[in-house]
Amino acid sequence: MQPEQIDPALVDFAVLAGWMDARGLPGGPFEDVAPLSGGTQNLLVRFRRGGRGYVLRRGPAHLRARTNEVLRREARVLAALEGTGVPAPRLIAACPDETVMRGAVFYLMTPVEGFNASVTLPPLHAGDAAVRREMGLEAARALSALGAVDHEAVGLGDFGRPGGFLERQVGRWTSELESYRALEGYPGPRIPGLEEVSAWLEAHRPAAWRPGIMHGDYHLANLMYSFDGPRVAAIVDWEMCTIGDPLLDLGWLLATWPERGDQSAALAGPLGAAGGLPAADELVAAYAERPAAVAGRDLPSITWYTVLACFKLGIVLEGTHARACAGRAPAETGDLLHSITLDLFRRARTLIAS
């Protein structure tokens, strides 16, 4: 694909060339230009210039209220992770000035050589259950590398509001759920166990925790795996990143872990269908292999974090169901996500009972 085949309202390659040149990046024509698909509304375009590969990331055509600020935060986190050992795309250069590219903040990062196992599964991985089991364990180990990073030491001491993070979670997401009632046509949340789960979370909140960098949406669809084995090549889609309790990321992984018989297996795509993945307790053990990730953190309370992840993600997905009821999202998408919400709350209640 040629640069002119990309909508210039989204990526003006003449502007991009001048901006790159001013930063001393290799010059020359843009080659191998191709949009990348993914589970995000943000735009990704891969290209080569001057013998070097890049991926440009910017917001969608219709920028949302916080899109530019989210992109600035993403770029800052990727820069901070340089040299930490966390598998993530590396920031090459960022343009926080939205006046350069027609109102959009953007940044350039290194391309990731890998595949998304929720979309495709190469023959090596599809044909070997032992490889798939290691893929699961590597997902937990990659996350523990992030949990081990000292956010203040890498310059992210002012990046979030960790004070009271756990204490405000239930109220914050209960309010979010209540806000959906303003959507005409939405009958209100019909979620069995909603009050039970909410009350349990408030009554069993861990008394102490240690802040750190959170990805915020850590699950299989946001991982890229190496073509030649089970290694996580990169954690992607950092738009929800913040400073909070990293054990919630581990809880999120467990809450979304494929289980046959519910929608979570379907959302994990080919990897979920192929099976052979480790059990939840094996994931927790793999995470705990890195002492710096668990020091000062209440890993024995991981069930609480998993229930919170079910609660929070279920409410987020219910928002699309509510918008579908109001005619603002496809009905079939709303129905699917509502069924996943019900599965998440069913999983939360099972965890509470156990």
Image (cartoon, helix red, strand yellow):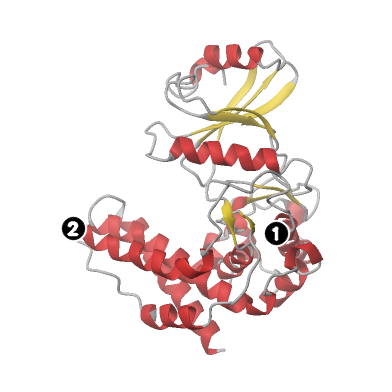
Q: Say whether residue 330 is left or right of residue 13.
A: left
- Residue 227 x/y as whole percent: 76, 46
The mark nearer the N terminus, 1 or 2, is 1
- Residue 144 x/y as whole percent: 73, 60
Q: At x 67% / y 46%, what residue is drawn?
A: 115
Element class at badge 1? helix
Instruction: Please tell me which residue lies in front, 238 or 321.
Output: 238
**What's under tag 1, amino acid-wise?**
Gly
Element class at badge 2? loop
How packed mark 1 is, by other alpha carbons closer than 10 Å (few <14, some 14-19, many 20 or more), is: many
- Residue 248 x/y as whole percent: 59, 65
How packed mark 2 is, by other alpha carbons closer than 10 Å (few <14, some 14-19, many 20 or more), is: few
Task: Specify the quadrant of the image occupied by residue 154.
Answer: top right
**What's under tag 2, amino acid-wise?**
Glu
Task: Specify the quadrant of the image occupied by residue 63.
Answer: top left
Instruction: Please tell me which residue lies in front, 27 or 85.
Output: 85
On residue 147, the disc is: 1
Task: Specify the quadrant of the image occupied by residue 287.
Answer: bottom right
Q: CA distance from mark 1 to mark 2?
A: 41 Å
Q: Say whether residue 154 is left or right of residue 199.
A: right
- Residue 97 x/y as whole percent: 50, 25
On residue 3, the disc is: none
User: Which quadrant does the C terminus fall into?
Assistant: bottom right
On residue 184, the disc is: 2
Residue 260: tell me if it is visible: no
Q: At x 47% / y 72%, what residue is drawn?
A: 344
